[in-house]
Amino acid sequence: TTHGQDGLIDDSGYVLNDETTEVLVKQALSHAQAGADIVAPSDMMDGRIGAIREALEEDGFIHTNILAYSAKYASNYYGPFRDAVGSAKNLGESSKETYQMDPANANEAIREVGLDIEEGADMVMIKPGLPYLDIVHQVKQTFGMPTFAYHVSGEYAMLKAASQNGWINERPVVLETLLSFKRAGADGILTYYAKQAAKWLK
């Protein structure tokens, strides 16, 4: 967005939950109509999974899965991505702490995941991944749902920079890092290393 937030805002900059959810429903339907097998709202608006599930069902998209970004933390690890797309500058001194989760709060993650599952999520995401392996583990143990972890831009950048400076051996360190997600309980990993890791694992 031009303002860097993950939703519509009012004149004071406050993120409008319900109005944003209406737009998310339209986006999800357009993706399903285009043939998407999975829609993955990452905005952290309350109630959006239920609204999207209801709309998909009403339009006959009963086989379209929802990957809910259920535990998306207000993290500093998103920096490189925000710089790349220009949203860091747009966000300015604002933050996303009113709708993304407090890094100190583990219980909230379990509540949010539970709510999203009740609303119709087929899969759940924890983001970032590496600093929140305890959350990945708790979610998998508590719900037994397909659980994904997002190895975000800041995590990738640290490994890449350390490798380029000769401080680590990139291949084994990256694979060890990805293994830690699997060990914690992740069924899938979203990572900027996906293409490279696939080649290494051939």
Image: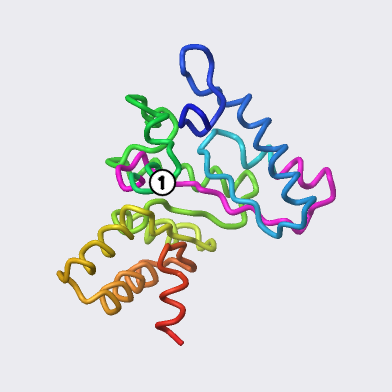
Q: Give the labeled residue for mark 1.
A: 84
| Extreme residue toward the bottom, this view | 202
Left-right relation of 199 to 26: left
Residue at 22% in and 76% down: 169
The relative height of residue 55 versus residue 140 in the rendered view (above or below) is: above
Residue at 36% in and 43% down: 107
Query: Looking at the image, which is closer to me, 53 or 30?
Result: 30
Quarter of the view holding residue 186 = bottom left
Query: Looking at the image, which is closer to me, 81 or 59?
Result: 81
The relative height of residue 40 versus residue 177 in the rendered view (above or below) is: above
What range is drawn magenta here? 53-78
Residue 61 at what x, y percent from top left? 80, 52
The relative height of residue 104 versus residue 126 in the rendered view (above or below) is: above
Tag 1: Cα neighbours inside 10 Å, few (<14), some, or many (≥20)? Answer: few
Chosen colour scheme: rainbow
The relative height of residue 59 versus residue 195 in the rendered view (above or below) is: above
Residue at 71% in and 57% down: 36
Q: Secondary structure at mark 1?
A: helix
Does the segment drawn in magenta span residue 182?
Answer: no
Residue 77 at what x, y percent from top left? 31, 48
| Extreme residue toward the left, this view | 167
Quarter of the view holding residue 92 = top left
Query: Looking at the image, which is closer to me, 57 or 114?
Result: 57
Residue 193 at what x, y percent from top left? 40, 68
Left-right relation of 2 to 78: right
